[in-house]
């Protein structure tokens, strides 16, 4: 890394860095998914209330609607992504042991992808009436 | 009971997130504004949680 006598400008030195070494992409995606969920939360709550007390056939019928399924799928993608970034930031900030940090970030990734895929699978299964 | 608490956690997170949108847009940095936004997020989160549950019982309670 460049020392204090380097000719590189301060901006050039921080470019692409930060604790995750990925610059501001996580910052941007965290806000992107947050705005997405702020817009989606009202229709999602309406759908969840529609589903209260329904049996399997009733739930499959409601989720068989394409816009309803798409709204829930969008919310799942936004929320699991948001959750993955949020937890990763906490891990990177508070776990100082490098190996434990990498293992935790990895486990966090596995968990969030598993939650996302399980949720998407459930929505697709119900919305295709199975 | 657990789902009620989880609803509150989500609603509080939503309202605090909107508070952060306000800050991201460059507003609300004065001391009294920060206080008001934080209290507002807390109260709005509780209110939304209660409202959602009232609507849920009114609409879905009989099913």
Image (cartoon, coloured by chain):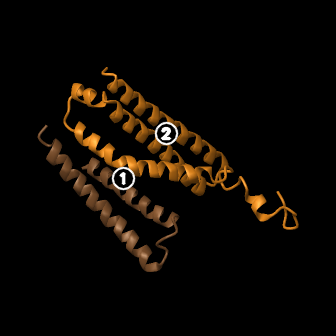
Chain colours: A orange, B brown
Q: Which residue is mark 2?
A: A112
* Chain at tag 2: A
Secondary structure under the numbered disc 2 in the rendered image = helix
- The residue located at (30%, 66%) in the rendering is B43
Q: Which residue is mark 1?
A: B10
Is A24 on the left or on the right of A45, as rendered? right
- Of the pair A20 and B33, the residue shown nearer to us: B33
Residue A56 pos. (x, y %): 24, 26
Mark 2 residue crowding within 10 angstroms, few (<14) / some (14–19) / many (20+): many
B5 w.r.t. A104: above or below: below
Q: Among all residues in the image, which is located at the extreme top?
A: A130
Cα distance in 3D space between marks 1 and 2? 17 Å
Quarter of the image holding residue A109? top right
Crowdedness of circle 1 by 10 Å Cα count: few (<14), some, many (20+)? some
Q: Position of residue A74 (x, y in %)?
A: 43, 39
Q: Would you place residue B19 above or below residue A46 in this image?
A: below
Q: Secondary structure at mark 1?
A: helix
Residue at 58% from the left image edge and 44% from the top image edge: A105
Residue farthest left in this picture: B62
| Residue at 38% from the left image edge and 60% from the top image edge | B15
Side (left or right) of A7 relative to A71: right
Query: Residue A39: image x %, image y %?
Result: 39, 50
Residue at figure coordinates x 19%, y 36% from the top left: A53
| Res A10 label | none
Q: Quadrant of the C terminus of chain B?
A: top left
Image coordinates of residue B47 in percent, x first then y, are 26, 61
Q: Is residue A66 above or below residue A49?
A: above
Q: Residue furthest front?
A: A67
Q: Is residue A86 visible?
A: no
Residue B38 makes an appearance in the image? yes
């Amino acid at each position: 890394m460049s020392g204090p006598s380097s000719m590189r400008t301060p901006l050039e030195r921080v470019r692409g860095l930060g604790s995750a070494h990925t610059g501001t992409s996580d910052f941007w995606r965290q806000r992107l998914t947050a705005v997405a969920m702020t817009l989606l939360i009202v229709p999602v709550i309406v759908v969840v209330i529609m589903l209260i007390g329904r049996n399997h056939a009733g739930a499959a019928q409601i989720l068989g609607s394409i816009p309803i399924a798409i709204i829930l799928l969008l919310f799942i993608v936004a929320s699991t992504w948001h959750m993955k970034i949020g937890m990763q930031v906490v891990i990177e900030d508070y776990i100082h042991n490098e190996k434990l940090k990498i293992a935790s970030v990895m486990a966090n990734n596995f968990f969030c992808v598993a939650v996302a895929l399980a949720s998407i699978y459930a929505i697709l299964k119900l919305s295709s009436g199975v | 009971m657990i789902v009620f608490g989880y609803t509150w956690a989500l609603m509080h997170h939503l309202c605090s997130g909107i508070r952060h949108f306000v800050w991201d847009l460059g507003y609300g940095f004065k001391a009294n504004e920060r206080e008001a936004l934080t209290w507002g997020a807390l109260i709005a989160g509780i209110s939304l949680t209660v409202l959602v549950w009232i609507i849920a019982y009114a609409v879905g309670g009989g099913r």
